Amino acid sequence: MVKRSKQLKEWTGKFGKAYTDRNYNSLADLDKLYKSLFGITRTSLNRLFLNKIDRNARILEVGCNIANQLLCLQKMGFKNLYGIEPQDYALRLSRKRTKNINILKGNIFDLPFKDKYFDIVFTSGVLIHINPKDIKKAISEIHRCSRKYIWGFEYFAEDYNEINYRGKKSLLWKTNFPKIYTDTFEDLRVKKIKFLKYRKDDNVDVMFLLKKVSRLIF
């Protein structure tokens, strides 16, 4: 079953715990990291994409880990924030370091919410860890739970490329995730997209905001 995928087992075990420990950053450290990598802070990127969004919008992050991104959104003034995280260790840490953010245990393949429950559903460095054979199941859950927007920040490549990740195979892929979304769902349109080249090499990440549009009936 997809819910018991190899990737999910790794991220909920010791390998995932080590990742969480490596990435336990303050918001200031997170902004410094993005500035060093791309020449722009994560906060500035978020403002480019979300500044016109109502601060009462209901927002879900899928795979929130220790809630860095949710804390960043909260600092921007967003008040109705949710996170889903499959790893118990990260879940405990995220709940300790947040206040007035709803963080639940769950995974991308079975989101415990009603259809169109959120105004925005987003991932940040999560789709890259989903096996390509499972990606449509994952994004279908995101699409189902979103009423209006899907937001993402992921590694980018024109086609699927598997990357060896810390000596392990089948844990990291990069591709054109916004195109996979729009090719899969007829009601999605690209509202905003930004490609971010790394300052020290030729790798590229992409931030994208997709909007659901009404389907025309003839």
Image: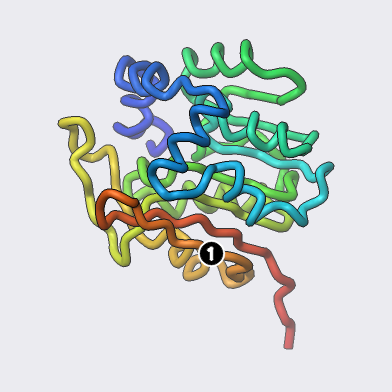
Front-lying residue, 153 or 213: 153
Image side of residue 75 versus residue 95, left or right: right
* Image-quadrant location for residue 77: top right
> For the N terminus, which image quadrant?
top left
Front-lying residue, 187 or 43: 43
Q: Residue at x 36, y 23 (%)?
A: 19
Q: Residue at x 72, y 58 (%)?
A: 148
Residue 33 to residue 180: above or below = above
Residue 122 to residue 211: above or below = above
Type of amino acid at the residue the image marks with label 1: Ile
Q: Can you give x and y, in whole percent of width and height, for residue 82 in the image?
A: 68, 32
Residue 170 to residue 190: above or below = above
Q: Residue at x 75, y 44 (%)?
A: 117
> For the C terminus, which image quadrant?
bottom right
Front-lying residue, 144 or 99: 99
Q: Residue at x 60, y 59 (%)?
A: 209
Is disc 1 placed on a helix, strand or loop? strand
Check disc 1 and report the residue beneath it.
Answer: 193
